[in-house]
């Protein structure tokens, strides 16, 4: 287990009602979300979607850090399409994830090096390492069309 030497930021949120028509809000009021059970009717989001959003944003920032250190110029079209699965394993709920990284215009080897470095840098990746199945897919030429997903 990694123990933090210095806390840079603490996010605070309160949830009431849980997945089933609950609400979550941050202490600063910047984010308020209604919750719904995945795959059921409802107007809210779910924890898996929130994890996908947070992880993809963090991973993209980690790629920028690695690229800066390696002096690689990133394409403006850089995107991360995160997919988080909720499922069952041996009768217990669990998660799995795929991070689909789109780095159009970069050489495949350079793109792979950036993604591997980001996976060793991103706090979400580090937190899940060895705990859930995570697959990174790298596309260095054609970005995934999110509208098709």
Image (spheres, helix red, strand yellow):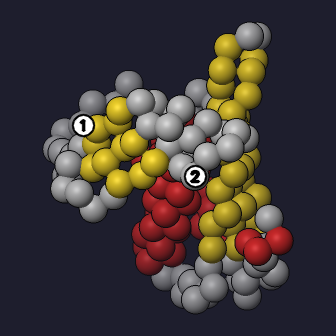
- Specify whether residue 89 is in view: yes
Instruction: Tell me the crowding category of disc 1: few under 14, some 14 to 19, or many 20 or more residues within 10 angstroms, Cα based.
Output: few
- Is residue 35 left or right of 82 when viewed as pictured? left
| Secondary element type, mark 1 | loop
| Rendered position, 21 above or below 65 | above
Name the residue rendered at 68%, 77% in the picture: 103
- Specify whether residue 118 is in view: no
Q: Nearer the viewer, mark 2 or mark 1?
A: 2
Where residue 4 is drawn, which disc sits there? 1
| Rendered position, 47 above or below 29 | above
Question: In this orientation, which residue lies closer to the viewer: 51 or 128?
Answer: 51
- CA gap, disc 2 to disc 1? 37 Å
Where residue 43 is drawn, which disc sits there? 2
Name the residue rendered at 41%, 30% in the picture: 17
Question: In this orientation, which residue lies closer to the viewer: 36 or 137?
Answer: 36
| Rendered position, 70 above or below 30 | below
Q: In which image quadrant can residue 29 be found?
A: bottom left
| Rendered position, 148 above or below 2 | below
In percent of width and height, residue 3 lies at 27, 30
Q: In which image quadrant can residue 65 be found?
A: bottom left
């Amino acid at each position: 287990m990694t123990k933090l030497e210095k806390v840079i930021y603490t996010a605070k949120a309160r949830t009431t009602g849980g997945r089933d028509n609950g609400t979550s809000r941050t202490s600063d009021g910047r984010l308020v979300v209604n919750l719904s059970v995945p795959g059921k009717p409802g107007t809210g989001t779910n924890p898996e979607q929130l994890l996908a959003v947070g992880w993809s944003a963090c991973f993209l920032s980690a790629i920028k850090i690695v690229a800066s250190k390696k002096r690689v110029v990133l394409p403006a079209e850089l995107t991360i399409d995160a997919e988080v699965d909720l499922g069952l394993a041996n009768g217990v709920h669990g998660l799995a994830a795929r991070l689909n990284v789109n780095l159009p215009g970069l050489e495949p080897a350079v793109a792979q090096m950036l993604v591997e470095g980001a996976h060793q840098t991103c706090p979400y990746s580090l937190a899940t390492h060895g705990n859930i199945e995570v697959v990174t897919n790298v596309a260095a030429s054609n970005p995934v069309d999110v509208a098709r997903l």
